[in-house]
Amino acid sequence: MTFAAPPGTEPQTCSSCERSSVLGYFDRWGRCPACNPSAAGPPIGGVVYAFLLMGVALAPFGDLEPGGRLAALLAIWPLGLVNTVLHEATHALAARILGWRVHVVAIGAGTPLLQLRLGGTRLVLNGRLLATNGNCVALPEGTVPSRGAIALVTAAPLAAHGVAAAAALPSVSGDSFGGLLAALFAASNVLVLLWSAWPRDIPGRGATDGQTLLDLWRDPDAEIAKWRLAVVFWPYHKHQRDGKAEEALKSAEAVLAAEPRDELVAGSFAAAAHAGGRPERALPHLGAYTKVIERSRSRGLRKLPDRALAARGLFRGPEHEEYMRGSLLVALDRLDEVLTLSERGVAEAASEEARALWQGCVALSLLLAGKDLDRAEEAARWAYERLPWVAFVETAWGMARIERGGLEEGLAAFERARKVDATGGMGALHTAWTAVAHVRRGEREQARMLAESLRAPGVWPACLRRAERAVSGGC
Ligand SMILES: [Zn+2]
Ligand SMILES: [Zn+2]
């Protein structure tokens, strides 16, 4: 599984950004993976759904006026939305009946258009409503869900669609607008039922209800384990979004206290502590942590071929665990260990792509430690010539450029990388090295403000150190 470019291969440049790579990951329009918006694939389900329902609306049965049929056509999309609401509301209702907490009910895809808080539940209307899909996050609180409870909450909407279709059947007729609407409603419910019951994984978005039920039947322990992870992580995630970091960790700790010998719970607690900027709390559970990392990755992602993983900048299996361990060690400021781990990664990499990612890690750990700039630059360049669309690779390259005085080039790299990943760690790197660039341009005040913003809990200590050294004239 090596995709090494033959020696002397000419780099190819993306048709819509400045990134270029010798590994040839460009689509047929010459776009790099970061510039390819349709990476998720075409919305086949939605298109099939719309065409089948149009067929029902225009089918030659009954003697309805053409105007009535046209009105029925217009009703297809709202009916799809009604069905989505019915689906997600049934998940939520079943969860409430079991005493679970409903965290989120969302309709549509894309970014939120409208948000409403109802008790502990966030109701979200997303911007891309043409895609009539939805999402419901409901979990028991502070306890591990049983197999039966998971099955009930997962299967409830499937039953609801069946009942709704059956209830509409007696009113179906081709002679009136209402009768035709009933036919559309019944057909829509049957289609959504089949679509959610069809077992499959959606890369990056988890599994369908049918897949969850199938997993629960085939391998209940593994499936329940996934839910255990969620029970720890979700309340944590919610508190953190509300800016209550301490409370977030407390909620994760409560579950850990209730299940002290559960390795998955311990590992999830470590994940929460790491993400919450308390890496020292994660450290005692490092072993459990690396074990849950691979499990918590959705199977859809695990099944992706090597090239698709590399396009997203992801390692596979054990290499991914090592990478996560490295990021925890960066948070703990144990940079020598990170360097050793990354060098081992380079030496033992399973593919050219993995080697490029590890070279990016070598560059990052050297730059953060402020050591051996020549080697850091060489490693960053090696990685950047291959996987420039991976945020941390592009960031390492930008950092190396700024250290060398290539300020414009470095800041432009940050700008592009931010569009791919703007999370905490990446953000702190951009802030620290942007401060360095400001100092080199003589803009000391801006640099000082940026350095100041890095004095926050959870920020990688090496980022603050680099910015402060620049501001105090050590540059
Ligand atoms: Zn591009
Ligand atoms: Zn569902």
Image (cartoon, rainbow, N blue to C red):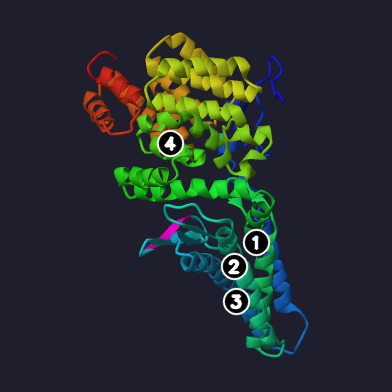
Say whether residue 115 is magenta: yes
Which residues make up the magenta segment? Answer: 111-116
Q: Position of residue 313 (x, y in %)?
A: 56, 32
Establish whether ligand 2 lies closer than 8 Å to the Cβ of label 4.
no
Count neighbours of disc 3 (C-alpha within 10 A) and say few if under 14, some if 14 to 19, many if 20 or more: some
State which tag comes first along the sequence, 4 or 2: 2
Measure the C-alpha gap from mark 1 to mark 3. 22 Å
Residue 196: image tag: 1
Q: Secondary structure at mark 1?
A: helix
Q: Residue at x 48, y 68 (%)?
A: 97
Q: Amino acid at mark 1?
A: Ser
Q: Main secondary structure of the magenta part?
A: strand
Q: Secondary structure at mark 3?
A: helix
Residue hosting label 2? 157
Q: Which image quadrant: the C terminus?
A: top left
Establish whether ligand 2 lies closer than 8 Å to the Cβ of label 1.
yes
Residue hosting label 4? 270
